[in-house]
Amino acid sequence: MHHPDWDTPERLALRDTVRRFTTDRIVPHLAEWEEAGALPRELHRATADAGLLGIGFPEEVGGVGGSPIDMLTVTEQMILSGGSSGLIASLFTHGIGLPHLISSGTPSLIDRVARPVLAGEAIVSLAITEPDTGSDVAGLTTRAVPFGQDYLVTGAKMYITSGTRADFFTTAVRTGADGAGGISLLVIDRDTPGVEVSPPMKKMGWWCSDTAELSFDEVRVPAENLIGAEGQGFGQIMQHFAAERLSMAVQGYAMAQRCLDLTLTYVTQRETFGRPLASRQLVRHRLAEMARQVDVARAYVRAVADRWVAGDDVIAEVAMAKNTAVAACDHVVDQAVQLHGGMGYLRETEVERHYRDSRILGIGGGTTEIMNEVVGRLLLA
């Protein structure tokens, strides 16, 4: 479906670059990275060299410029070209790990963290979730206590994307009283004494995206590693949730479109009882329903993303967009596996990986239930 803002000549050229890069540098190795449980660092450097790692980040901090729509275009096209949402989560972890740091603009942190990350030379993770607090960000308990010119940080973080490989953690800590007002963001260097990183956690999907548990035992962090001012952390976190949720929504409809594409090819080639599967009305109607859900999700998510970039207040719409894309993705990956039959259950078949990868989208970045709570509260406000 043609969408003028997303199909400008520049964005079509960007898609071509992404398609070539994904086909050449990602697809041939993805199965091996899935088995290894992590992406190689060289991929970050190669992605930076191709001009794709820093898209959507300003040139003055080491990015390549462009708007958030350009970043979402890269995400979408990588999946459509045979990549995976797990690969996106891992390769572009800086999409959630850097924005707070860049918008606070501390030159020393930008030079030490943002530039090397955007050059593909370092990896940054976002560390908010804790073993006892997921969606309840205001309830986090990792504490940072002033100690001379430093903070002493003690606590634990859970489900940290790229955590086993990260050089830096953008970490939500409690510097003040209980509740949202007592939270700050602090950059913690991985090699600081007292930082412990677990082995990679074994997950249902997103295998190539390494996930870790972190523990901090009186980790001494310089006060200059503070992002913004003390007590601003909760607001900073909330401000950047929309970008993460829209990214996951795009991953959802892109994964659904990719599974539809793969299934259309399969049912045309696969013969049963002497004729192609596609010749059967039952199959055609299932494909039609898959296509409808993908198209509706894509049109809605893109419309909300456009409004978000324009500066509209779309907190409720972003939550609805994520849920819309997740629902479409859930339906389509399930039908894709079903229409592939026994082949769809094999590891070697791409739809099998998408089926497993899709399950996290309704959990990460705000669960489906929390998204509905966001919408419900705003409706009644």
Image (tube, rainbow, N blue to C red):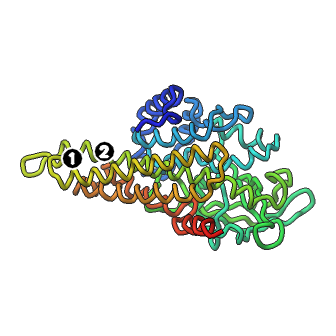
Residue drawn where x is 62% and y is 54% of the image: 314
Residue drawn where x is 38% and y is 46% of the image: 257
Q: Residues within 10 Å of mark 1 (few under 14, many from 20)?
A: many
- Front in this rendered view, residue 318 or 131: 318
Mark 1 to mark 2: distance in Å?
9 Å
Q: Residues within 10 Å of mark 2 (few under 14, many from 20)?
A: some
What amino acid is found at the position of numbered circle 1 in the picture? Val
Q: Which residue is mark 2?
A: 262
| Quarter of the figure with residue 342 | bottom left
What amino acid is found at the position of numbered circle 2 in the picture? Leu
- Front in this rendered view, residue 85 or 11: 11
Whole-percent x, y for residue 24 in the image:
42, 32
Whole-percent x, y for residue 57 in the image:
66, 38
Residue 371 image label: none
Residue 135 visible to the viewer: yes
Q: Among all residues in the image, which is located at the extreme left?
A: 274
Q: Which residue is mark 1?
A: 267
Q: Among all residues in the image, which is located at the extreme right?
A: 148
| Quarter of the figure with residue 133 | bottom right
- Front in this rendered view, residue 145 or 309: 309
Which quarter of the figure is the N terminus placed in? top left
Work out whether 368 lies above or below 255. Answer: below
Which element is circle 1 on? helix
